[in-house]
Amino acid sequence: MDMEELFNPESIAIVGASAKPGKIGYSIMRNLVEYGYEGSIYPINIKGGEMTIKDRKFKVYKSVLDVPGKIDMAVVAVPAAHVPQVVDECGRKGVKVLPIISSGFGELGEEGKRIEQQLVEKARGYGMRVIGPNIFGVVYTPSKLNATFGPTDIIPGKLAFISQSGALGIALMGWTILEKIGLSALVSIGNKSDVDDADLLDYLEKDKNTEAILIYMEGIKDGRKFMQSAKRVSRKKPIVVIKAGRSERGARAVASHTGSLAGADRIYTAAFEQTGVLRAFSISEAFDWGRALSNLPEPQGDNVVIITNGGGVGVMATDACEEEGLKLYDNLEELKVFANYMPPFGSYKNPVDLTGMATAAEYEGALKTALAHPEMHAVVVLCCQTAILDAKDLADVLINAYTESGRKKPLVVAMVGGTEFREAINVLNENGIPTYPEPERAIGSIAALYRWHNWKTKEQVWRRP
Ligand code: COA
């Protein structure tokens, strides 16, 4: 199925566009304009006239049928009772894809599901695809498209995020901005009456702007279809899923939220294992992994090296590596080279402890050495805030060393400290080096990369302990 018009529409109509701040039809218009969408924007409102959004004047059409040009995508934000007529008009207009924001369909029960199904049949009859209903919209950063009523300033990146939940999805949009997580796409799929996770996976598999995919999922209607797509896509790009409704009571909550059947959790677990999908249990875990998976190259071998200035964080990271099944490189003859970057009381045994004496210069030397060494396949840099370690300098040398090396090996960083370190974490993340405030999160993220790589290359299945 071709989803091109969902991500790269040449023209968009907003049905229910509004000039009144606070209304959903206004927020979508504002986001489209503010985020810099360069295609044609057609506001549709039964009242007609004109509207000004962020100093840009628009002619308002009473119906999509009145728009002179073609319309690729129509975002529908009118009350549910008006949606059937809008779908019909959009079909007659030749619209290709129809994100329906409106709530009040399948999530209400059987009657709502029946109406929803009729809408889809009508749309498909016209050759249109439906996203939703009951959604907050779609973002595709490469085409500067933000057709949502969520936050505006989504950071461009290589992680695609698909959300079945609306409110949580919007909240996470804001969260990705705060956490400096770059997104390629964000699609709210709500009731999944037509387009589902598998359709989007099929598109994103080939999308050159997407390196990893993260799905918040409550339930799947067509399990076989999902598994087929997920298995194929996982061989090219990693997929992380947060599957909510793990518990029996959680599954009942899912049914009344998006009308999905959460099903027996162990069936989902088995399906994810078979298809190489990495199942995360929390939002921070999912995005930690997504950050690493969308930014880092695959490892060319198993040997991990930890470089630290603190014994404590080194030990904690070592524990985490053991638990995650990561292999710490321990060829002492080769590791000896790190002695050049530490005082005599340092330790070049892996974890390599540069000691609290380390400045950005020692980190630079040690990192460059690890990145250049043929037997060191992945690097973890840990830093504790000290009086002599300048956070900004450290961020600069890490970014420069990694960039100069050609970014061929996975590198994750953990920086434990206060305000300056938080700022450095942001800078590193903005520069595509996955950086975390705790060692375990850095290790968990590089472990996710290894798990996906091992599934892909060795069919090795990971089971959560
Ligand atoms: N064609 C064109 N415009 C129409 C229309 C139609 N058939 N029917 C209504 N409109 C216009 C209205 O005139 C109004 O314009 P105004 O703001 O200038 O007055 C605008 O469209 C919106 O209609 P209104 O009746 O005011 O609805 P609303 O803005 O209060 O609510 C929805 C519309 C879609 C937001 C609401 O029905 C809804 O479903 N909300 C839930 C959304 C949601 O939570 N989605 C889930 C993801 S989190």
Image (cartoon, rainbow, N blue to C red):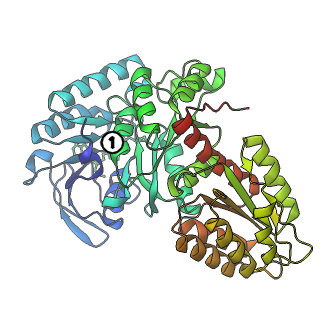
Give whichever of 230, 262 is nearer the camera.
230
Q: Is residue 150 left or right of residue 462?
A: left
Residue extending furthest right? 345
Ligand 1, by image quadrant, is top left
Where is residue 375 shown, x and y percent of the image? 66, 57
Q: Is residue 33 left or right of residue 184?
A: left
Q: Residue 162: which quarter of the image?
A: top left
Where is residue 194 shown, x and y percent of the image? 32, 30
Give whichever of 270, 156 is nearer the camera.
270
Give whichever of 98, 347 is nearer the camera.
347
Q: Is the residue 63 above or below the residue 183 in the image? A: above
Q: Residue 386: which quarter of the image?
A: bottom right
> Is the residue indicated by label 1 positioned so its CB lies within 8 Å of ligand 1?
no
* Picture residue at 25% right of the left edge, 46% below the top: 4
Q: Which residue is mark 1?
A: 203
Q: Is the residue 425 above or below the residue 450 in the image? A: below
